[in-house]
Image: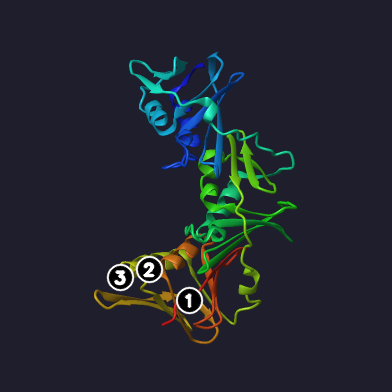
Amino acid sequence: MRIRAERDELADVFSRANRAVGVRPAQPILQGVLCETRGTTLQVTGTDLEVTIRTMAEVDVKEEGSVVIPARLASEAIRKMPAGAVELESDDGEVHIIGKGPKFSLRELPVQDFPDLGEPDLGDGVQVSGDALTSAIAQVGVAASTDAARPVLTGILFEPADRGLRLVATDSYRLAVRELEGVETGTEGLVPARGLRELARTVGADAVTFAIGGREAVFGSTRGSMTLRLIEGTFPNYRQLLPESYPNQFTVDREVLIEALGRASLVAEDHIPVRLRLMEGGAEMSVTRQDVGGETEHLPGRYAGEDVVIAFNPRYLTDGVSAIASEQVVLQVLDGLKPAVIRGADDDAFTYLLMPVRI
């Protein structure tokens, strides 16, 4: 194989494929990316067998072929080349990366050892706005668990809903639900949040097509494709956690609340709750840490309901408020012991439910 392309385009296609390569892969061959020429296109594929990313770039193909190159080393070598054209050529078990002056020679990995991943199937796919999809994933992704011991909670549930597509994630302490209106899909699947977080930086584009099959989900665009192996297991029955109505509601400016939480977090840690006393005229936020001190301030806002004292993990509360796009946030509570809901004042497409901390 021998190709020629501009450094920045080549660096981009390698770095995007590299995001699927694990730090400590189960097989040595998975340390590499598969480079293949198809006509005038270079396709670079990285995988850890759970996440597969295929990226593409138009290049000047001098000689067709395929080669597996050490992923991170090749990506960094290309990125550090001088600006301008860069050549990649394979010769006698080595891949040469040649720029205007520098030249790297990297040992090839055996192509025959690279897993046969098949072609991504988007035949029954649904096209959506790339910005809308990645925004929805970012909103609900904050509630997905990172605990590998509970794999079902590390995914984002894609399921059909009355209004279109619903995305759901929970780590058992908080729950995030996002509706994408008008996106009609007849199938559902539990998609790894770890891979979905890479969507915007790898194959994200103005339009993205996705399809969910029996074992995997595929997302594709003009920039390439991402294939994610679905998580097996039953997702929790989250609907039972969402009360039909809340008698107590506090409305506050989003930025005011985020800034106040930032100040409170200077004193608090994850295990130190932030306490809210909800009352007419707003709320009093306070945090006390025995070995450090405390912080108290008044949050102006509109409150309707009975006086309530409720406490939250400050990071979880900040995550939920930050995920809301509206200028004003509505905090809905039943009492100090039951889950509370956070929504945008003018947007009911996103719901964030948070368990309180007992005080």
User: Which residue is at a point 47% across and 31% down the rendered structure image?
Assistant: 14
- Does any portion of residue 242 appear in the rendered image? no
How many marks do you count on the picture?
A: 3
* Residue of label 1: 356
Q: Label 3 is placed on what type of residue? A: Val
Q: Label 1 is placed on what type of residue? A: Pro
Q: Position of residue 97 (x, y in %)?
A: 41, 20
Cα separation, mark 3 vs mark 1, equals 19 Å
The numbered mark, 3 or 1, whose residue comes first in the sequence reads 3
Q: From the viewer's perspective, is residue 88 above or below residue 325?
A: above
- Classify residue 181 by image quadrant: bottom right
Cα separation, mark 2 vs mark 1, equals 13 Å
* Residue of label 3: 267
Q: Label 2 is placed on what type of residue? A: Asp
User: Of residues 330 and 293, which is closer to you in this image?
Assistant: 293
Of circles 3 and 1, the one toward us is 1
Element at label 3: loop
Query: Which residue is at the far bottom?
Result: 306
Of circles 3 and 2, the one toward us is 2
